[in-house]
Image (tube, helix red, strand yellow):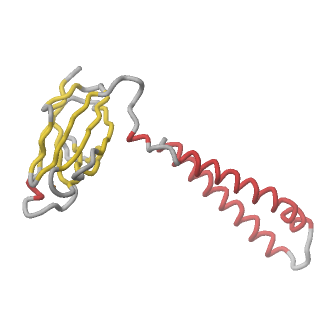
Amino acid sequence: MHDTVLWVSVALLLLLIAIFGVVIRASTRSTTPGAAQAVIGKARTPLLWGLLIFGAIVVYGTMTPWPHAAPAGNEKPIVVSVTGAQWSWQANRKDVPAGKPIVFAVTSTDVNHGMGLYDSDYRLLTQVQGMPGYVNRVHYTFRKPGTYRLLCLEYCGLSHHEMIGELKVTAK
Ligand code: CUA
């Protein structure tokens, strides 16, 4: 999905550059309407309709849930329930298998926390808000076994920086 968005953006950017190029070339050629202007004039209405329809398709297509919130494949995900509280993370399990879809169901008992999932090199993999009264879900499939960490991404009080949880990912 991210690749698709990237390539659509690149294609639109190139189209925009091409349109600017045509307009600049046409505007510097002559001041009286010529063949180029006639072609542009004729192409304007279908171009506008094309852009409108394309825009409507893009809007419709991107209104579906983001892919990182969708489970990978049809396999039933393992639920890891995580509760944030000043100032620690409680989870219903300490380890999960690699290669299996996981869904983190995250909430909070007090204030808003941000659950950031990090690998052993402290690279952020995914994140979701932990909010009192809500359960927010984020799907993730671990590729490699190892020790992963949950850090709080939202300032939640004096010991915000101490909200560090650990999750072991075991080989399949
Ligand atoms: Cu919890 Cu910052």
Whole-percent x, y for residue 100 in the image: 29, 25
- Residue at 92% x, 70% y is 34
36 displayed left or right of 104: right
- Residue at 50% x, 44% y is 64
40 displayed left or right of 92: right
Whole-percent x, y for residue 120 in the image: 18, 41
Q: Residue furthest front?
A: 133
Return the residue nearer the eye: 146 or 78. Answer: 78
Residue 102's place in the image compared with 150, above or below, is above
- Residue at 53% x, 48% y is 62
Whole-percent x, y for residue 124 in the image: 26, 47
Q: Residue furthest bottom?
A: 31
Q: How many marks?
A: 0
- Residue at 83% x, 59% y is 43
Residue 152's place in the image compared with 167, above or below, is below
Quarter of the view holding residue 19: bottom right
Return the residue nearer the eye: 43 or 121. Answer: 43
Which quadrant of the rendered structure holds the C terminus?
A: top left
Whole-percent x, y for residue 57 in the image: 63, 48
